[in-house]
């Protein structure tokens, strides 16, 4: 039986509903990946700032720091804790691009969001392919930000938006195959995919980020945070930029605004992943229905054509163990 094709707005509101009903779980899941990156960066730059500001006092107490090699080694040693926290949080953030798709599929099958570890393992079981996927996507992004490639890069970005859904749900593909398969699924649905992307970008990158900025301003958090960063900004070589009106106060305020945007975008990653997983399922169902449609009989003589070879795609079903755990109490996870 053919499944009914869903409209873009239906996909968006269904995804929004899933996100809102389970927002406490998604916020908990994204807590360390988002705030851990900020904590790691703060430790790296904060400790470095403290170390350089107090190097004379430290050298007086510890004469070994008078040696240039020891001074540099001490600085590197000081940033290691923050760097470790940042790298771990950053990796968990990347893993969430695949795990959240698995969580969405689990919710559609069981009605629950549960067992984060098992969903992470869906990605970690193919770590090499996942790293290669991000590596290729990184190269593509670097090329796309070159001004002469903006239009082409944007078009292909729309076609490649489902690469992480393909990675999560389909086996037997190479890292390049994930991009090819995403393009194949979206082909013929570019305008609708672009519409869904526009809705998600406007909501998460603009409206929610602006709303969070208003909350920070209302609670009087923006200015104190900006003022706290200003002393650090003063240590940067920004004198050549001052004639252009770029002051330490403006730079520190811009940093705070970018932090607010990062928090808003990071904590709404589950919403975007849910919507793209629903969109992937929708387009996959359309593709399956078209393949299964019976061909009309023709009275004309049959002409046999050699069909081109196609690569085999193995659809990944959700792990039965994950479904079993969903039947247990949520408090166990």
Image (cartoon, rainbow, N blue to C red):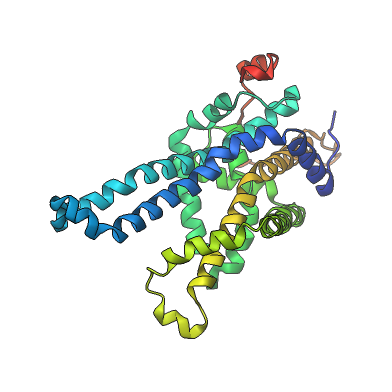
Is residue 73 shown to the viewer in this render? yes
Q: Does residue 7 appear to the left or right of 229 in the view shown?
A: right
Viewer-proximal residue among 267 and 113: 267
Classify residue 256 by image quadrant.
Answer: bottom right
Q: Does residue 56 appear to the left or right of 331 in the view shown?
A: left
Is 206 above or below relative to 279? Answer: below
- Residue at 44% of width from left, 45% of height from top? 86
Which quadrant would the C terminus be assigned to in this image?
top right
Is residue 309 shown to the viewer in this render? no
Classify residue 181 by image quadrant.
Answer: top right
Q: Does residue 15 appear to the left or right of 169 in the view shown?
A: right
Q: Does residue 218 appear to the left or right of 238 in the view shown?
A: right
Classify residue 279 by image quadrant.
Answer: top right
Q: Where residue 158 sits: x, y (%)? A: 65, 55
Judged from this view, the residue extending furthest toward the bottom is: 243
Q: Where residue 52 sits: x, y (%)? A: 29, 59
Q: Where residue 136 sits: x, y (%)? A: 47, 50
Viewer-proximal residue among 120 and 39: 39
Which quadrant would the N terminus be assigned to in this image?
top right
- Residue at 61% of width from left, 23% of height from top? 115
Is 162 above or below relative to 213? Answer: above
Q: Where residue 149 sits: x, y (%)? A: 54, 68
Is 142 above or below relative to 37? Answer: below
- Residue at 66% of width from left, 46% of height from top? 268
Is 39 above or below relative to 256? Answer: above
Viewer-proximal residue among 132 and 203: 203
Q: How many marks?
A: 0
Viewer-proximal residue among 159 and 1: 159
């Amino acid at each position: 039986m053919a499944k009914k094709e869903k409209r873009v707005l239906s996909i968006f509101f269904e995804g929004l509903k899933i996100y809102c009903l389970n927002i406490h779980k998604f916020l908990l899941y994204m807590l360390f990946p988002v705030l851990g990156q900020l904590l790691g960066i703060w430790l790296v730059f904060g400790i470095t700032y403290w170390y350089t500001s107090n190097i004379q006092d430290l050298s007086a107490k510890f004469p070994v720091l008078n040696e240039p090699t020891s001074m540099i080694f001490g600085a590197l040693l000081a940033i290691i804790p923050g760097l470790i926290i940042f790298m771990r949080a950053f990796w968990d953030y990347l893993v969430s691009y695949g795990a959240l798709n698995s969580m969405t599929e689990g919710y559609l099958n069981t009605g629950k969001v549960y067992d984060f570890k098992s969903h992470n393992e869906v990605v970690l079981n193919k770590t090499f392919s996942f790293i290669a996927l991000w590596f290729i996507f990184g190269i593509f992004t670097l090329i796309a930000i070159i001004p002469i490639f903006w239009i082409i890069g944007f078009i292909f970005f729309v076609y490649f938006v489902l690469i992480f859904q393909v990675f999560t749900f389909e086996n037997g593909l190479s890292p390049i195959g994930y991009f090819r398969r995403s393009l194949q699924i979206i082909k013929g649905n570019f305008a609708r995919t672009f519409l869904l992307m526009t809705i998600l970008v406007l909501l998460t990158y603009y409206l929610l980020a602006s709303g969070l900025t208003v909350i920070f301003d209302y609670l009087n958090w923006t200015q104190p945070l900006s003022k706290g960063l200003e002393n650090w900004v003063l240590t940067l070589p920004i004198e050549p930029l001052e004639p252009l009106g770029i002051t330490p106060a403006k730079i520190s305020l811009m940093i705070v605004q970018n932090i607010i945007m990062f928090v808003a975008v990071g904590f709404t990653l589950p919403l975007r992943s849910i919507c793209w997983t629903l969109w992937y399922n929708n387009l996959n169902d359309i593709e399956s229905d078209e393949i299964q449609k019976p061909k009309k009989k023709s009275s004309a003589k049959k002409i046999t054509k050699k069909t081109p070879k196609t690569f085999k795609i193995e659809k990944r079903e959700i792990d039965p163990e994950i479904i079993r755990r969903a039947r247990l109490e949520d408090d166990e996870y």
